[in-house]
Image (cartoon, rainbow, N blue to C red):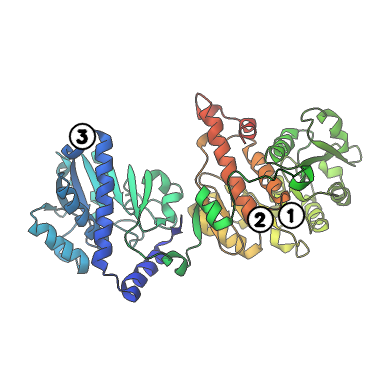
Amino acid sequence: MEVATSAQMRQIEAWAIDDIGIPQVSLMENAGRAVAKEARRFAEADGRGTNFRWLILAGKGNNGGDGLVCARHLADMGFGVSVLYAESPERMQGAAALQRDIARRLGIAEHVLAPGDPAAGVFAGYDGLVDALLGTGSAGKPRAPYAQLIEAAVGSGLPVVALDLPSGLDADTGAVSEYCIRARLTVALGYAKRGLHQHPGAAYAGEVVVRPIGIPAGAAERAGVNTHLLTTETLRHKLGLESPLPRSEDSHKGTYGHALVAAGSALMSGAGLLCARAALRAGSGLVSWAQPASSVAGLRGFAPELMLRAVPDGGAGEWRGTAPEHVAAAAAGADALIIGPGLGRWDGDGLWLRDVLERLGDLPAVVDADALNMIADDGAAPGVWPVRRAATVITPHPGEMARLAGLSVPEVQRDRIGLASDYAAKHGVTVVLKGARTVVASPDGAAYVNTTGNPGMATGGAGDVLAGIVGSLLGQGLTAVQAAAYGVYWHGAAGDRAAAGRAQAASLTAGDIVEAL
């Protein structure tokens, strides 16, 4: 499913209307009818059916025109409907003005918000609101009279069905203003909008459904829409992957790759163990777990399926005592490298990591956790290693992404899709920006927003598990973007299965996610 920006939607609609010749009034009719059908579904689920009374909040633009079409169709369905204009309906133009006139001729009740009126008393007698105030064409904080009407609508406590996106929500970033509608249901028209699938906007959008309005097939591709929701359909049609991944009956352990996990240390061995176990569960034929030699003895037996590789450490028991050439030697025969979880930090670790990754320049790699902080503190970026010829996937959480990009965490969270996409293109890496609605961005500009996962996965070690999954898939021969996208989706789905077996999601652990893969 495509996810468009506001600029892309304007381009799509202009092409449909001006180049193809679809009348704008047709698109508006389809949009309003689609929202009315979803509003009817909402009322039926409430149990009151057509006894549910709707108040349509209409702005002066095309979003308001869509709302008037919705009002007309709801009235035809037998609902009680009225329209509340945020400002004089005489300011409407074009197709929106046409819909205003039709609604008047049909006798649909209308009210106009009086200047300075908080509108609180207008909501009495209604059961729900349709938000048709501000569409994708609006930007910035809503001003009067829209701000006052939004504030009153939120204060009314009535459920809201938002038309295209909640008023006050940034269509591109998901940022919300001081005045923003909190919808129970958002009916995205034509295509989903980026802001509906990024927090905090996702929380304000409620349930999101996408409904067609008559825009011809191929319009999104023509407009350069290259962000998609990560679903099984997207995996199949955009990335050529089936879920679960098929296995041949005549395969053997060598068919599914050998992953080397360079992770964990004396004080953080759990990070390495979770990562390595996840790589096994994700289907690697072989998984080797490299550790400083002095730590290996205490790890025997924790996971008998793992092959332990002792890296000379001079008796230090930490990665600081290992030489890059010894780490590279441990990777002999491997098909993918996973490096970073639980490595620890030490003086000169950035140069050490650079050396390791350059020596293994032909080996696909997942770079995670401490390794990302080494890169950030080294003042480098993954793309500065020109001798790294193989695919590189980085898996930062927002704090790590902030350090890599030289930004604050709020700046990272302000536009996760845009930042991840820019970073991937600039540095030639595939970025997995973790968090709610994890974003996968590839160097070619494509981005994927995950639809699986739950808040119970906000637990230590969950990221180590993800790194192991993605690295395993790289070793099995998937491309960087395939491994990252499928790994993120699978990781979230496993978390959902694990949470479903618990009394509450808060009790979920990273080990539960591994076992649910």
Q: Quadrant of the C terminus?
A: top right
Question: Label 3 belongs to which residue?
Answer: 48
Name the residue located 39 percent from the left edge and 57 percent from the top edge: 191
Looking at the rendered structure, the kind of residue marked 2 is: Ala
Horizontal and vertical percent position of residue 356: 81, 53
Q: Which residue is mark 2?
A: 480
Residue 231, position in %: x, y? 51, 48
CB contact under 8 Å: marks 1 and 2: yes
- Nearer to the camera, 454 or 333: 333
The local crowd at label 1, few if under 14, some if 14 to 19, many if 20 or more residues have their Cα within 10 Å, is: many
Q: Amino acid at mark 1?
A: Pro
Decide: few, some or many residues near mark 3? Use Cα within 10 Å; few <14, some 14-19, many ≥20: few
Instruction: Using the numbered discs, state the Cα–Cα distance from disc 3 to disc 2 in whole angstroms.
Output: 50 Å
Q: Secondary structure at mark 3?
A: loop
The numbered dot on residue 364 is 1
Say if 192 sits above or below 445 in the image.
Answer: above
> Would you say residue 267 is visible in this rendering?
yes
| Residue 312 pos. (x, y %) | 90, 42
The disc, 1 or 3, on the residue closer to the chain's N-terminal end is 3
- Gap in Å between the C-alphas at discs 1 and 2? 8 Å
Q: Which mark is residue 86?
A: none
Q: Residue at x 69, y 50 (%)?
A: 372
